[in-house]
Image (tube, helix red, strand yellow):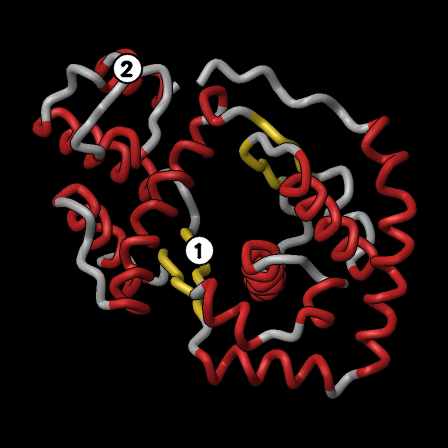
């Protein structure tokens, strides 16, 4: 397997971008030089770009989201900005899927999650399955990133596009040269339609909220579904699979 050979050559068990790029490296990256970090990230990006169909990210300013969205509006669809970002990403993925006339459902793999984070993800997958039956329930799992190369690739893409989002929202320069190199490398693929970077400015976010609020029937359906979900949640917790053991 390509990733296994890459891992063995450079002597790591898993890749985590922020840990690698930190000036205070610990654990398996403790003795890595800047030169090695740059080479490993460069090769990882090459593997990601040549072995994936598309890269898609979504970013939103947390403070803007909290100040512009009514608390009651958030309750039935996700309690925080992460959940609503993921909801928006799922909607984009559905359109992407349909535009390519694909019939097989996605298979979603999430990094290990517990508590409310996992509840929110499972809530969204259940909501979307109620609209697109058979496309979401049974088609996702929670895995340890150390055991799934694709999750390590997603981590590197997310870390890179986070730098891009900080630059866009706050005019914050990349944290270091590794972030700059990764950001520019991935951004170069936008013109090739491999990378799609999604976001909300304040006007788009306000318009999204108002569009939802102009459809009270859909809002009521979502609220009723969410109430039923909360009632089923405890039973669901007792029957769902345990988290995969994680060595990282």
Q: CA distance from mark 2 to mark 1?
A: 29 Å
- 2 or 1: tag closer to the N-terminus: 2
Relative placement, left or right, of 226 versus 81 is right
Task: Decide which of 242, 96 is in the foreground and name it.
Answer: 242
- Residue wearing tag 1: 56
Q: Position of residue 64 (x, y in %)?
A: 47, 71
Secondary structure under tag 1 reads: strand
Task: Decide which of 141, 210 is in the foreground and name it.
Answer: 210
Secondary structure under tag 2 reads: helix
Assign the C terminus to one quadrant of the image: top left
Task: Decide which of 51, 40 is in the foreground and name it.
Answer: 40
Query: 47 above or below 101?
Result: above
Q: Position of residue 59 (x, y in %)?
A: 43, 61
Please tell me in which quadrant of the rendered image residue 1 appears.
top left
Eye-nearest disc, 2 or 1 = 2
- Residue wearing tag 2: 28
């Amino acid at each position: 397997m390509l990733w296994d050979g890459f891992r063995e050559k450079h002597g790591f068990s898993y890749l985590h971008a922020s840990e690698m790029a930190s000036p205070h490296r610990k654990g398996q990256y403790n003795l890595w030089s800047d030169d090695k970090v740059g080479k490993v990230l460069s090769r990882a990006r090459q593997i990601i770009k040549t072995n994936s169909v598309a890269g898609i990210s979504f970013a939103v300013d947390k403070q803007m989201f909290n100040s512009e969205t009514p608390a009651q509006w958030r309750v039935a669809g996700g309690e925080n900005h992460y959940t609503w970002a993921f909801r928006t990403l799922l909607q984009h993925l559905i359109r992407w899927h349909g535009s390519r006339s694909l019939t097989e459902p996605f298979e979603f793999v999430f990094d290990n999650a517990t508590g409310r984070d996992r509840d929110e993800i499972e809530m969204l997958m259940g909501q979307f399955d109620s609209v697109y039956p058979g496309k979401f329930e049974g088609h996702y799992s929670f895995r340890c990133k150390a055991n799934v190369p694709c999750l390590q690739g997603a981590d590197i893409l997310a870390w890179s596009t986070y730098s891009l989002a900080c630059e866009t929202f706050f005019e914050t320069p990349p944290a270091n040269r590794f972030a700059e190199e990764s950001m520019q490398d991935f951004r170069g693929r936008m013109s090739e339609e491999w990378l799609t970077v999604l976001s909300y400015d304040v006007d788009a976010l306000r318009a999204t909220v108002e569009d939802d609020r102009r459809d009270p029937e859909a809002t009521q359906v979502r609220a009723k579904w969410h109430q039923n979900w909360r009632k089923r949640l405890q039973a669901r917790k007792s029957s769902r699979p345990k988290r995969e053991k994680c060595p990282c």
